[in-house]
């Protein structure tokens, strides 16, 4: 192991306090190389110690509690929304309805429906009657035409007879 390789390992694995892959080789190099041994001490002093004096900031307990409470609340709301099904919506909608107002409204709707059905039935009957009347009327027209043609035939025959009789008389 040369000095460059030794210092690479010092700056990576040693400062991270990870066991160096080439731990034994590095130890052997440091034992025989005061320069690299010094490098290791300087690196630890300059690169690690400044962080040791820093105090780890702690979040106030009230802030932590507030954040956790909000997270739990949002999660519960999400779960509630996920579990919300259409029949729950329907039940809520029915519960929200004003039933005392709906009772007369329903009765009125029933009356209107009955009236409509009755009206349709009566209209149907009226149409049937009208059709019967029309048939009767057509029958009467047919009869009257027949009567008229009979009358005309009779009339024609009467004239014919008259002329024939007059011819015979003359
Ligand atoms: Zn060295």
Image (tube, rainbow, N blue to C red):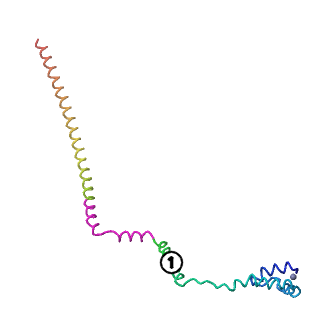
Q: Which residue is found at the position 18% from the left and 29% from the top? A: 150
How many marks are shown on the rendered structure? 1
Q: Where is residue 166, by image quadrant?
A: top left
- The foreground one among 35 and 61 is 35
Could you tell me residue 101's position as x and y percent? 28, 67
Image quarter where the N terminus lies is: bottom right
- The foreground one among 96 and 27 is 27
Q: Magenta stretch: residue 74 in it?
A: no
Q: Where is residue 26, by image quadrant?
A: bottom right
Instruction: Classify mark 1: helix, strand or loop.
Output: helix
Residue tagged 1: 70
| Secondary structure mostly seen in the magenta stretch | helix
Image quarter where the C terminus lies is: top left
- The foreground one among 129 and 140 is 129
Q: In the figure, is residue 134 to the left or right of 165?
A: right
Q: Which residue is found at the position 35% from the left and 70% from the top? A: 96
Could you tell me residue 159's position as x and y percent? 15, 20
Q: Magenta stretch: residue 93 in it?
A: yes
Could you tell me residue 80's position as x and y percent? 47, 74
Is the CB of mark 1 within 8 Å of ligand 1?
no
Q: Which residues are magenta?
A: 85-111
Q: Residue furthest top?
A: 170
Q: Is residue 140 above or below residue 117?
A: above
* Ligand 1 placement by image quarter: bottom right
- The foreground one among 166 and 115 is 115
Q: Which residue is found at the position 23% from the left and 44% from the top? A: 130
Q: In the figure, is residue 61 to the left or right of 22?
A: left
Classify mark 1: residues with Cα within 10 Å, few (<14), some (14-19) or many (20+).
Answer: few
Q: In the figure, is residue 25 to the left or right of 161?
A: right
């Amino acid at each position: 192991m040369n000095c460059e390789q030794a210092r690479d390992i010092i700056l990576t694995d040693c400062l991270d306090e990870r066991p160096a892959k080439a731990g034994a080789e590095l130890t052997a190099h440091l034992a025989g190389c005061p320069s690299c041994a010094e490098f290791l001490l300087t690196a630890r002093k300059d690169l690690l110690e400044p962080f040791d004096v820093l105090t780890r900031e702690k979040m106030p307990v009230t802030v932590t509690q507030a954040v956790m409470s909000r997270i739990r609340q949002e999660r519960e709301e999400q779960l509630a929304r996920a579990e919300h099904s259409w029949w729950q919506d329907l039940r809520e909608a029915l519960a929200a309805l004003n039933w005392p107002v709906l009772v007369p409204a329903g009765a009125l709707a029933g009356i209107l429906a009955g009236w409509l059905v009755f009206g349709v039935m009566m209209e149907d009957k009226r149409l049937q009657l009208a059709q019967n009347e029309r048939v009767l009327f057509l029958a009467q027209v047919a009869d009257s035409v027949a009567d008229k043609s009979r009358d005309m035939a009779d009339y024609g025959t009467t004239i014919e007879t008259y002329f024939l009789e007059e011819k015979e008389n003359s």
